[in-house]
Each structure stands twice: as structure tokens, then as C-alpha cells.
Amino acid sequence: MREEHTQYPQKVNVWAGIVGNHIVGPFFRDGNLNGDKYLELLQKDVVPTLANLHPDPANPQVPANTIWFQQDGAPPHYQINVRQYLNQIFPNRWIGRRGSMEWPARSPDL
């Protein structure tokens, strides 16, 4: 058997969250995470799952307006289309870099 090495290590990103007594996810993405991949993760996995757990009575496709979303200041989280999407889904209810509530620098909360 021959051992193989690659120049670049394999990468996987894992997203998971907690809402009340529920664990949301985990959701996996291969490779480097950029803003477009993160937006797709939010649109296809995270937000629909949150909407299933706690739907907004007026629009069951989005999470209830009692849910706040928190993320750190990683570059994919800061991309303009990600922030626009979070503003649409969680108006004045998301914590992060340039969010409704700024993410505190060097905070260990996540």
C-alpha cells in the first residue's frame, strides 16, 4: 500500500447552532468557506431548519421574530450579500460584524 500526500490538506467546515433545547445541524461544507458558500448554507440549510423549529405565523418560510442570530466576524460572515440576507431574514435581530448589534472584538462567546 502506498501512502499518498496532497499539497493542500483536505478541509471541511461544520456549522451548528443551539435554539432553546434544540441543536440545529450540524451542516457540512467541503473546501474553503467563502461568502457565497456561507450564504448558500444559510439559505438552504440554516434558515429553513430554524423556520421549521419556530416558524413565523405570518410567513412560515422564515424563523419567528423571537429568534436572534449570532455569528462572529469571520470574512465569509461579513460579505455584503450575507449581511443583506441576514437583514432581510432577521431584521434588527442579528449579532455580528456590521449587524444590528456589533460583535464584540475578541469575544469568546461563540
Image: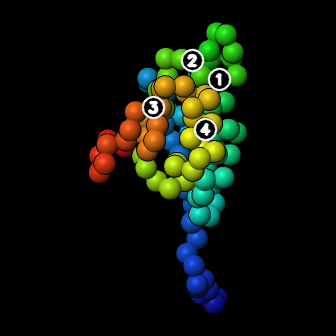
Label 3 with label 1: CB-CB less than 8 Å:
no
Secondary element at tag 1: strand
Q: Nearer the viewer, residue 3 or 94?
A: 94
Residue shown at 59%/47% (left/top)?
80
Q: Marks 4 and 1, how far apart in space?
A: 15 Å
From this view, report whether residue 29 is shown above or below residue 63.
below
Q: Position of residue 82 (x, y in %)?
A: 60, 43
Label 4 with label 1: CB-CB less than 8 Å:
no
From this view, report whether residue 82 is shown above or below residue 54.
below
Q: Earlier in the sequence, mark 4 or mark 3?
A: 4
Q: Nearer the viewer, residue 21 or 51?
A: 51
Local crowd at mark 4 within 10 Å, few (<14), some, or many (≥20)?
some
Hey, what amino acid is under mark 4?
Answer: Gln
In-image side of 28 versus 75 (left or right) = right
Camera-side mark, 4 or 1: 4
Q: Marks 3 and 1, how far apart in space?
A: 18 Å
Which residue is under mark 1?
62
Camera-side mark, 3 or 2: 3
Q: Quadrant of the N terminus?
A: bottom right
Q: Earlier in the sequence, mark 3 or mark 1?
A: 1
Hey, what amino acid is under mark 1?
Answer: Val
Q: Nearer the viewer, residue 53 or 85?
A: 85
Which residue is under mark 3?
100
Q: Nearer the viewer, residue 41 or 11?
A: 41
Secondary element at tag 2: loop
Hey, what amino acid is under mark 3?
Answer: Ser
Local crowd at mark 3 within 10 Å, few (<14), some, or many (≥20)?
some
Camera-side mark, 3 or 1: 3
Residue 31 disc label: none
Q: Earlier in the sequence, mark 2 or mark 4?
A: 2
Which residue is under mark 4?
84
